[in-house]
Image: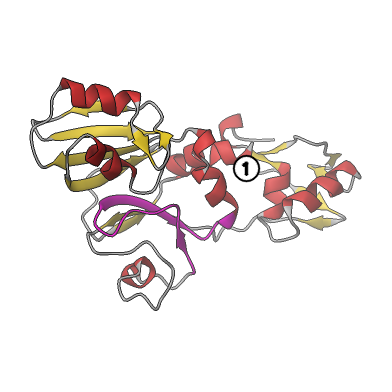
Amino acid sequence: MSGTDNESVRLNKYISSSGHCSRREADTLIENGKVTINGQVAVQGSKVLPGDVVVVNGVKITPDDNMIYIAFNKPLGITCTTDRRDPSNIIDYIGMDDRIFPIGRLDKNSSGLILLTNDGSIVNKLLRAENGHEKEYLVTVNRPYDKEFVRHMETGVPVLGQLTLPCKVRPSGEKTFKITLHQGLNRQIRRMCEYLGYRVIKLKRIRFMNILLGDLETGKWRYLTESEKHELLKDVTK
């Protein structure tokens, strides 16, 4: 094998990403001794590194290199839907020929970072609240807030019949603050502020897990870097 463990991919995912079969079917093939890595029979949990040769039932497997992962700075007014009947849909706005879909959503009246991909195997895993993935937002409210507002936001307020999970709030101005969430209830930040008597004027997502919005211009998108992809996907390839 060559490369480092940080570049490794679990064997079942490597096989499924080639389009040869599903990940579950790949597990069965591995259990039955039908898979080799560099000529040696593989076992469950085996990892594949760059340069490794994977053979299934005598056929060399090549992973699909056509997976797309992009970061998009969503403008106000764009809807995070794949429904092309909606004239404000995010897919037509981006205009990519490949079939992609958003990971999660941002409200039509919110802006900032959203990821899109054609890798359907990762979406649900990335969005599960129990995974605790961080999402950071820059928020502007309609009037100056105080320490009590910050305390309540951080410890939790009732939203949609439940208490929001603890979060981190960092003041950045008398009416602006950054908030880091580990969950994604519908219109969560707006509802939290409304409960405390404030109205959100602007809401922009500036980070999703390890991916930063940075200086990406509004309405523009970029491919994720290799290091960004590795960090983003490592939890879902375990």
Q: Where's residue 68, x and y in %?
A: 48, 58
Q: Residue at x 32, y 32 (%)?
A: 180
Q: Is residue 166 visible?
A: yes
Q: Quadrant of the C terminus?
A: top right
**Crowding at mark 1 (Cα within 10 Å: few <14, some 14-19, many 20+):** few
233 sits left or right of 196 in the view: right
Residue 193: which quarter of the image?
top left
- Quick check: is 115 in the magenta stretch? yes
Residue 217: which quarter of the image?
bottom left
Q: Where's residue 71, x and y in %?
A: 36, 52
Q: Which region is colored magenta?
A: 99-120
Coloration mode:
secondary structure
Residue tagged by mark 1?
50
Q: Residue at x 41, y 29 (%)?
A: 165
Q: Is residue 35 visible?
A: no
Q: Is residue 86 above or below residue 191?
A: below
Q: Quadrant of the N terminus?
A: top right
- Quick check: is 152 in the magenta stretch? no
229 sits left or right of 63 in the view: left
